[in-house]
Image: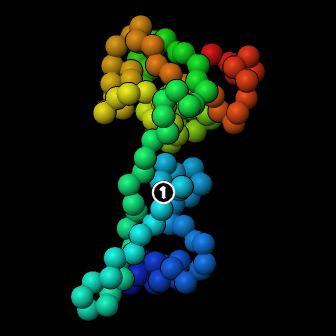
Amino acid sequence: MADIESYESALGAIPGSHPYPRTSRYHDAEIGIHRQEDGTEVRYTKRRLLPPLDAQETQDHVVGAGERPDLLAQRFFGDPGQWWRIADANPVLDPRELTHEAGHVVEIPVAGGLPRGDRRV
């Protein structure tokens, strides 16, 4: 526990520091500070708003049998941890809804700003 507290303390002392890595869905989320009555500061992540669905450049993908969001992220982004990018581009509450049915069409954000023709499907 002391290691976590010292890490958080050190992180808070660095101007512009952010507790989430660049690959995290929360990296761009604003960090708030709540001051308790005793003066203790508690850092928290403010609400992360999704960009409008029509503002993202996407490509269609027809879900195959046995596919999962993490497998799609590995295929399209080279990182299974980026499944949240696919979830953000589709109007679902539960990411499992993305691949629950073979033949379902999901939107895949175009990675790295590459034109659609440069991405393999």
- Above or below, comparing residue 92 to residue 14 in the picture: above
- Viewer-closest of 74 and 93: 93
Q: Residue furthest left?
A: 37
- Above or below, comparing residue 117 to residue 40 in the picture: above
- Please provide percent x and percent y for residue 32: 41, 69
Question: At x 49% / y 39%, what residue is drawn?
Answer: 51
Residue 35 visible in the current orientation: yes
Question: At x 41% / y 7%, what residue is drawn?
Answer: 103
What residue is shown with label 1?
A: 29
- Please provide percent x and percent y for residue 40: 32, 87
In the figure, is residue 64 to the left or right of 35? right
Tell me if mark 1 has few (under 14), some (14-19) or many (20+) residues whose alpha carbon lies within 10 angstroms of its own: some
**Secondary structure category for the residue under label 1:** loop
Mark count:
1
In the figure, is residue 72 to the left or right of 119? left
- Please provide percent x and percent y for residue 70: 47, 33
| Amino acid found under the numbered disc labelled 1 | Ala
